[in-house]
Amino acid sequence: MASTEVEYKPEPAEAPSARFGWHGEGMKTYKIAAWVSVVALLGMIIGNHEGHVEDWYLIGFAAVIVFLLVRGEVLSRGKWKKKK
């Protein structure tokens, strides 16, 4: 039979990450990784292939990533400003 005991889940203040001030995701790291991915995708265009269909896919994926990065910057532009 299955146990009826409930697992212990620590409170957020007791969690190890709360001790050293971790409060969310590393957005700066994600942005840097996204820009590196864009450069890598566009760098893959250079090669010895004859068909250019894959070039359009590489450009398309890079464009989507750039669009999401720019959109995120525009939408969060005034997020940290003080309101008067």
Image: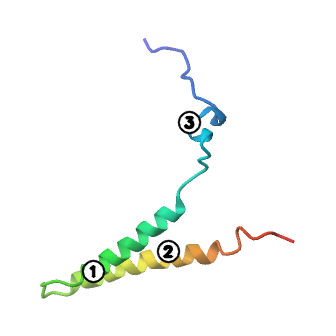
**Image coordinates for residue 20, horizontal then vertical, percent:** 59, 43
Q: Amino acid at mark 3?
A: Pro
Q: Amino acid at mark 2?
A: Leu
Read off the residue under disc 1.
43
Labels 2 & 1 near each other (Cβ < 8 A): no
* Marked residue nearer the N-terminal end (1 or 3): 3
Seen at 37% across and 78% down, the residue is 62
Q: Is residue 31 above or below residue 54?
A: above
- Measured in 3D between alpha carbons, the distance from the residue under mark 1 to the one under mark 3, in whole angstroms, is 40 Å
Image quarter of residue 80 = bottom right
Seen at 24% across and 79% down, the residue is 44
Read off the residue under disc 3.
16
| Residue at disc 1, secondary structure | helix
**Image coordinates for residue 65, horizontal then vertical, percent:** 43, 74
Q: Amino acid at mark 1?
A: Gly
- Measured in 3D between alpha carbons, the distance from the residue under mark 3 to the one under mark 2, in whole angstroms, is 32 Å
Which of the pair 46/65 is nearer the observer?
46
Give neighbour class at mark 1: few <14, some 14-19, many 20+ (Cα, 10 Å): few
Seen at 63% across and 37% down, the residue is 12
Which of the pair 75/23 is nearer the observer?
23
Seen at 45% across and 15% down, the residue is 2
Count of marks overlaid on the render = 3
Q: Quadrant of the C terminus?
A: bottom right
| Residue at disc 2, secondary structure | helix
Give neighbour class at mark 3: few <14, some 14-19, many 20+ (Cα, 10 Å): few
Q: Is residue 67 above or below residue 31?
A: below
Labels 1 & 3 near each other (Cβ < 8 A): no
